[in-house]
Amino acid sequence: MQIESSDVLILIDVQNDFCPGGALAVPCGDEVVAPILRIAPRFAHILLTQDWHPANHTSFAASHPGKKPYESIELGYGTQTLWPAHCVQGTPGADFHPGLYLPQAELILRKGFRPQVDSYSAFFENDRATPTGLAGYLRERGLTRVFIAGLAYDFCVGYSALDARRLGFPAVVLRDACRAIDLAGSVAKMEAQFAEAGVAAIDSAEITD
């Protein structure tokens, strides 16, 4: 697959709390850094997303007395998985992994900062209605196809890819530059949605200049 000047690499939530030792560690999450650094020089445009929660975020189990992490509750926008408190604004856990040195990145998009709604996708909050503004940014810049990597494959990466397709952007997920949580079969469910939506999933070795 050949990279074009109008392609953009979107790196999802490569933050300390999603890496080993973090509050919501994705297994082997830090292993995404090396393939990302290998592939990044091929792209003229790179964007980063950063999970950025207030301490009392509604997606945290600690915000709901009697509830435990990974249980679910119903909110106004649907079913919400409850997570350990993670990526709290201004904490070391919210910082990008120290190995992710990409000074050429053009934008850092913070998401999940609204206390009453979670945000997996880079494009929409979990209410599926509140936009982050990323689609408009891409269109104004003339960026037409998105390549997505980061954490986690079956949540924030996957939802970002599905929303990209919903908005009319071709979307390619770089599998070897992602790691998954796989909560209750979430990987298989996400890949079924990829197939239905037309999301391509490839290894970064399949990319050519």
Image (spheres, rainbow, N blue to C red):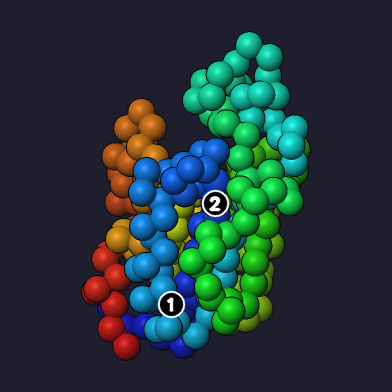
Residue extending furthest toward the top = 66
Vertical order, 118 against 195 (above or below): above
> Which mark identifies residue 16?
2
Q: Is residue 119 visible?
A: yes
The residue at 33%/41% (across/down) is 187
Q: Residues within 10 Å of mark 2 (few under 14, many from 20)?
A: many
Between 175 and 55, the one lying in front of the other is: 55
Placement of 77 over or under 21, stated as above or below: above
Q: Secondary structure at mark 1?
A: helix
Residue 173 in view of the camera:
no
For the N terminus, which image quadrant? bottom left
Q: Position of residue 41 (x, y in %)?
A: 43, 83
- Taking 157 as reference, is 98 left or right? right
Dot 1 alpha-carbon crowd within 10 angstroms: few under 14, some 14 to 19, many 20 or more? some
Residue 155 image point, x, y percent: 46, 44
* Residue toward you, 126 or 25: 25
- CA distance separating discs 2 and 1: 20 Å
Residue in view at x 24 percent, y 74 percent: 206
Tell me the amino acid under the disc marked 2: Asn
**Image quarter (top left, top right, bottom left or bottom right) of the C terminus:** bottom left
Q: Which residue is mark 1?
A: 40
Q: Quadrant of residue 103?
A: bottom right
> Left of 16 or right of it: where is 34?
left
Label located before the other in sequence (2 or 1): 2
* Residue at screen point 37% across, 43% down: 27
Q: Quadrant of residue 43?
A: bottom left
| Mark 1: amino acid | Ala
Depth check, front residue: 138 or 83: 83
Image spot of residue 50 (x, y percent): 62, 56
Instruction: Find residue 161 and report its image quarter.
Output: bottom left
